[in-house]
Amino acid sequence: MDLNTIKSDGIGGAAGEPAMLPTTAKKVFIKTYGCQMNVYDSQRMGDALAADGYTATDAIGEADLVLLNTCHIREKAAEKVYSELGRIRDMKAERASTGREMVIGVAGCVAQAEGAEIIRRSPAVDLVIGPQTYHRLPSVLARVRGGEKIVETDYAIEDKFDHLPRPERAEIIKRGVTAFLTVQEGCDKFCTFCVVPYTRGSEVSRPAARIVAEAERLAEAGVREVTLLGQNVNAWHGQGPDGKEWGLGRLLSRLAEIPGLARLRYTTSHPRDMDDELIAAHRDLAALMPYLHLPVQSGSDRILKAMNRRHTAKDYLALLDRIRAARPDIALSGDFIVGFPGETEADFEATMDLVRQVNYASAFSFKYSPRPGTPGAEMADHVSEAVKDERLQRLQALLLKQQQDFGSSLVGGVIDTLIEKPGRQAGQKVGRSPWLQPVIVDEKAGEIGDIIKVRITKTGYNSLFAELA
Ligand code: SAH
Ligand code: SF4
Ligand code: F3S
């Protein structure tokens, strides 16, 4: 997953509302940064605000409430928020000059990590709310309207998802035939480069029955593909309705029984949490897509140790052998960090070697970004920006070549495609391959929600072109 390119400007909140809402209904604009979990959270905040009388807008200037759902993973991600806040401050002033209010809220991982500091740096901000307290949004907003500035970043003991309203059926339909479903939050792994254990707290799994009920509701509204989300999704565990302890593999088997749900995915996984049952699910479940995002970060054991990944390069490769034995056509994706403190040219070469051995269908790679409060930031031997740049270029060239080779290997073959939406060009529709590539087909090839067999005719930069097989 590309943690910084998934952006959704604005949410839907209007559907399912009474038709005769006064024209003075409050409007909300939500901008989402970071990972898929933020995308899911933004939707759930949208659901809560819709229940509180807000309608969604894509025009920030019209918004009574602007919410930025932020990401803290790398410095660039966090700094983006402050430049955006500068822009919004001016709009707030402009609205105020016409007698209208604009409440500015910062949610997400920057909110959790920086708290009141955000209001000190950007005094136009009225509200800072961390990821564990979104269900309190309506009551917090009432206090903001009373003139208070609020920082709400404690870890709530209650489960926010139990207290957020369920999405309306019409809203699910509007969001399309693919959906995210968060099953697990937080992380106990404490990789030394990473802020997630601090911004999202420790690992919590949602109960199996709630997840099944939510997936059934999605399927009933026409969703065909569900991606289970968690910062460490394969650490999910919980009691099943049979009273037994379930892991993610068992949960996936249960979800595969839901009528209408044709495709399942999960992300993001940690190599240490791939148990036998989950690997077997890749062999046994036709609905589980043959595509796995399994970050390794580095191919050097010395660096993996310094990162506190608690596995070696050999462990990772041996795990891939077991997964490929269960599901020979599985394609892999991964995340990499170059220039972690102490990384030598030999360490970096070990990463390049690992990439050559694995052969990734896609991957995301980043320059190490020291994050305040993490052990990595305090380590000696930071690598210079110039060296990081140069290594990133070499790694990305290799990964891009592998991605293109993977795409080319599909040309001439027949694959299943889930038709998702109209294409950008007239006469086309866009589908989704089992490996998440957009597939461009003739609009008459199928209806949205259909899964059809297509023959790949050629590849685009990041997409496939196909005809009905
Ligand atoms: N839970 C997931 C990753 C979450 S963060 C996992 O363990 O794989 C997503 C990716 O961002 C990471 O896999 C890592 O490659 C990258 N990342 C995290 N912290 C970073 C940092 N300080 N600098 C650069 N990249 C980072
Ligand atoms: Fe971050 Fe490591 Fe947890 Fe992933 S497993 S979220 S990289 S601490
Ligand atoms: Fe970013 Fe928080 Fe996700 S730091 S990657 S939005 S968990």
Image (cartoon, rainbow, N blue to C red):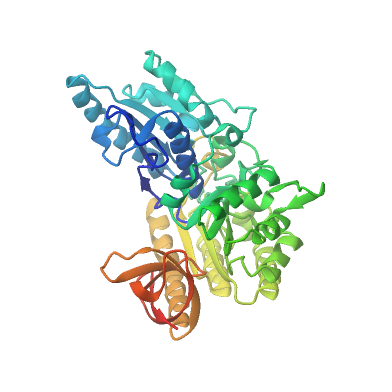
Give the vertical position of 412 relative to 160 (above or below): below
Residue lying at the far right of the rendered structure: 243
Query: Residue 319: where, in percent of width, then height?
Result: 69, 66
Say which residue appears at 48% left-offset and 42% top-offset: 168
In the image shown, does 458 or 376 lie closer to the viewer? 458
Residue toward you, 353 or 82? 82
- Position of residue 320 in the picture relative to residue 340 (left or right): right
Residue 19 lies, in percent from the top left, at 35, 36
Pick the quarter of the image with the C terminus: bottom left
Residue extending farthest to the front is 20
Q: Residue 466: x percent and y percent?
A: 39, 78
* Viewer-closest of 155 and 353: 155
> Closest to the observer: 119 or 387?
119
Find residue 199 and report its horizontal and vertical position in percent: 54, 36
- Residue lying at 42% horizontally and 34% vertically, measured from the top left: 50
At x 65%, y 61%, the residue is 256
* Up-down relation of residue 54 to residue 431 (above or below): above
